[in-house]
Image (tube, helix red, strand yellow):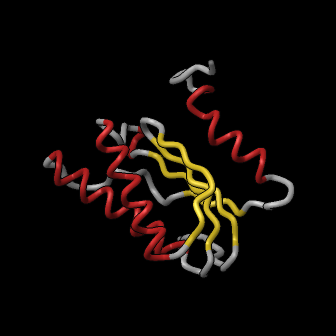
Amino acid sequence: MSRPYRLEAKNTLYHLTSRGDDRKKIYASEYDHKKFMEYVLKAKERFKFRLYAYVLMTNHYHLLIETLQANLSKIMHYINSSYTTYYNVKRKKAGHLFQGRYKSLIVDKDSYFLELTKYIHLNPVKAGIVELP
């Protein structure tokens, strides 16, 4: 069975998520978080998109981006494959780090943007990782 078509369009807002294989951790240290964000920022320079919100949880991440070109698959391939290579080399591992394909939902900027940014930023609070002051 083939994969469902994934819409790629310019000037489109996406909520992106990717989870660790078998729900395992994808960041083992604070340095891993920094390295992941380096790849996101390199992708941003290379593929030209706007990054509005993000959160890096222990076993998954959320990104809210707006593509300026129809290149979502290139962006996500760069981020996930670059970080997986870094992670596997550093830990002398091989194989998948992420579970299946990344998830992408198109977001209506007018009606859902604010709610989604709240959801992304409050994700660690809801998971009990951090508390609000």
In this view, 86 is above or below 22: below
Which residue is nearer to you in this view: 69 or 24?
Answer: 69
Image quadrant in which the C terminus is located: top right
With 119 as the anchor, is 27 left or right in this view?
left
Q: Is residue 55 above or below residue 11?
A: above
Q: Is residue 102 left or right of residue 69?
A: left
Give the residue at the far front of this rendering.
133
Asked which quadrant contains residue 32, the reply is: top left
| Residue 4 spot, x, y in % from top left | 61, 70
User: In percent of the image, x 71 and y 63: which residue is there?
Assistant: 106
Residue 23, quarter of the rendered image? top left
Query: Which residue is drawn at the image coordinates 48% and 76% (left, top)?
Result: 47
Task: Give how far across and how far down residue 24 sits, in percent.
Answer: 37, 37
**Residue projecting furthest to the left:** 92
Q: Position of residue 37 (x, y in %)?
A: 41, 53
Q: Identify which residue is drawn at 61% across, 72% down.
A: 67
Left/right of residue 48 with respect to residue 106 in the rendered view: left
Q: Between residue 108 and residue 45, name the one nearer to us.
A: 45
**Which image quadrant for residue 68?**
bottom right
Query: Whole-percent x and y of residue 11?
Result: 69, 75
* Residue at (60, 50) in percent of width and height: 53
**Number of numbered markers:** 0
Q: Between residue 66 and residue 100, name the one nearer to us.
A: 66
